[in-house]
Image (cartoon, grey):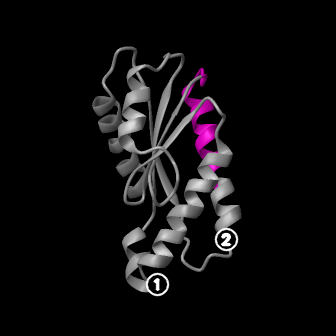
Amino acid sequence: KDSLTGLINYRTFSEHYANWKFDKTWLFVLDIDKFKQINDQYGHLTGNQVIQKLARLLENSVRSSDLVCRMGGDEFLVLSNGFASEEKAQDFVRRIQKQAEKEMKDTVTWIGISVGMTRVLEGESLDMAIERADRKLYEAKSS
């Protein structure tokens, strides 16, 4: 477990991925926008509180069959089955972003989250899927 959030850690996530039953599986990489600015302006303890809030939000926003982990820093991974199309996966992302905005609107430090997503190919390594989702994350950040 990740000691700050209580989510599974990356190593455990990787082990589950290795045994995952792939069925219209999508990988989502999420991070907090301008997180360094939060730490610099309000301090690391406040930054930790923001990370903890996002972790709880993610846990409460996914199905019990989904996997959520804190990869490190302010970056999280979600692995989820059952999205038949990119549109359905994007609906999931919008729902999480909307929920984050709603729950964090009164947090003076909150800016938002960015999400990169990719459909996971059968037999694909976790590293390759993360690399592709990371590219989408940086595209989302730049737009």
- Judged left or right of residue 89, residue 31 is left
The three-letter code of the residue at mark 2 reads Lys
Query: Marks 2 and 1: which is nearer the front?
Result: 1
The three-letter code of the residue at mark 1 reads Tyr
Q: Residue at x 42, y 24 (%)?
A: 120
- Judged left or right of residue 118, residue 7 is right
In x, y percent, where is residue 74? 42, 59
- The image quarter containing residue 83 is top right
Q: Which residue is mark 2?
A: 105
In x, y percent, where is residue 135? 32, 43
Q: Secondary structure at mark 1?
A: helix
- The image quarter containing residue 103 is bottom right
Observer able to see residue 57: yes
In x, y percent, where is residue 65? 62, 29
Observer able to see residue 143: no
Q: Is residue 96 magenta?
A: yes
Q: Which mark is residue 59?
A: none
Q: Which residues are magenta?
A: 82-97
Instruction: Give the crowd class for mark 2: few <14, some 14-19, many >=20 residues within 10 Å.
Output: few
**Would you place residue 90 above or below residue 120 in this image?**
below
**Quarter of the rendering occupied by the C terminus:** bottom left
Q: Residue at x 50, y 63 (%)?
A: 51
Q: Is residue 84 magenta?
A: yes
**Would you place residue 96 above or below residue 16 in this image?**
below
First reached walking from the N terminus: tag 2 or tag 1: 1
Q: Residue at x 58, y 43 (%)?
A: 93
**Would you place residue 25 above or below residue 57 in this image?**
above
Q: State the predominant SS element of the stretch in magenta.
A: helix
Q: Which residue is mark 1?
A: 42
Q: Residue at x 59, y 63 (%)?
A: 53
